[in-house]
Image (tube, rainbow, N blue to C red):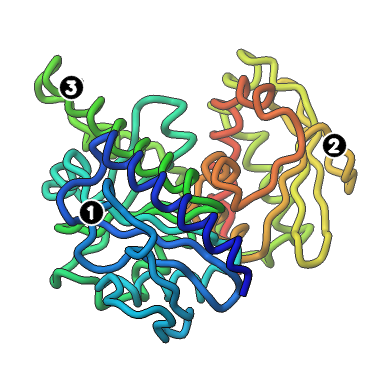
Amino acid sequence: MDQEKINKLKKDVIAIGRLLWDKELASGLNGNISVRVDESTILLTATRTCLGLLKEEDILLMKVNGELIDEGSVSTENTLHTEIYKNFADTQAVIHTHTTYVNGYFLENDKFNSRILETKLFLGEVRSIRQDTPAVTEFEPVIDELKGNNIVVLKNHGALAMGRDLFDCFLLVQGLENAIKVDAVSRLYKCGITNNTEIKVKEASKVEKKISDTYDLFSQEQINAIVKLVNEDPQMGVLGDKTDMTMELAVKLAETGKVFSFNFEKGKIVDVSSNENAEFLITATESIWRAVFTSQIDPFVATTQKKMNLRGDFAKISKWYAPCSRVFELWTGVPIE
């Protein structure tokens, strides 16, 4: 095993623990951090350690199968961490903390949607999973939720984030805590306007599934139905004209390489081809596309969290955020098998 790599990763864990502490995202002996060493091995903070005062001996080597390599007592959440690494091969780090505003908000609510646009793109809808024990014992609901969002809240417990590195996880934890602080402040400024209002508005604007037939994912029939729905939608017509949404957006199924490219002119789809060299290309696996078409994942959020790969200028496509969001909403109005 590469000892030099292990030493570096331990230093990274210590640094991120201190950052969490300094930003008041960790307190007391709460929280735990892990990082992947290789396919079968991780480093995980020991039980009863302070994330702000970690030492190298507080970070223990263990196998993903649960076998502890180093001497010591590993975090009580060790099985939660190992289950995440088993289910998500690309995940390189996990952070679990008990942040104040997040825990407070989710004691009274089940989900959170930021009204700040940049944060909404980064976090998406953050949902909670009920917990009845001090340590997580039911792992399947957590894994299912992480398939759609890299951050989830364990109700009555804390926030859990996974990512490509420790800093990715830190940004998610910090982003959620700050977003909920903003939400709390907004309610102080204007009593009665809560995040639940935003949720109700969002739910009310969902597309009605007017199409009774179901279609195979990435079939020509599904694409034809999407084009019809987009071009007949009055809201899309207004948004496309207002923002001059004229561009080419292609979608690609990773497993087969199948591509459909939508040519938009002022929000109307005037042509569909198999052009993979479109100005914007979104690529994802079948499981992610299914989650998109069934409203489980927002494509913008999936892109920022790297669940989907976007080729093209994100800043440029962001100017069409409103019409693109409407297109993605309309996609869900075409049922898939």
Q: Secondary structure at mark 1?
A: loop
Give the alpha-carbon distance from disc 2 to disc 3, as whole Å.
Answer: 43 Å
| Residue occupying the point 77% across, 53% down | 252
Q: Secondary structure at mark 3?
A: helix
| Position of residue 215 measured from the top left corner of the image (x, y, whole percent) | 66, 64
Q: Is residue 69 above or below residue 76?
A: below
* In front: label 1 or label 3: 1
User: What amino acid is at disc 3?
Assistant: Val
Of mark 1 and mark 2, the one earlier in the sequence is 1
Of mark 2 and mark 3, the one earlier in the sequence is 3
Tell me whether the residue at label 1 lies in contact with that at label 3, contact meaning CB atoms closer than 8 angstroms: no
Q: Nearer the viewer, residue 125 or 3?
A: 3
* In front: label 1 or label 2: 1
| Position of residue 36 measured from the top left corner of the image (x, y, whole percent) | 53, 65
User: What amino acid is at disc 2?
Assistant: Ala
Residue occupied by mark 1:
50
Quarter location, residue 269: top right
Q: Is residue 171 above or below residue 223?
A: above
Q: Nearer the viewer, residue 100 or 322?
A: 100
Residue occupied by mark 2:
278
User: What amino acid is at disc 1?
Assistant: Cys
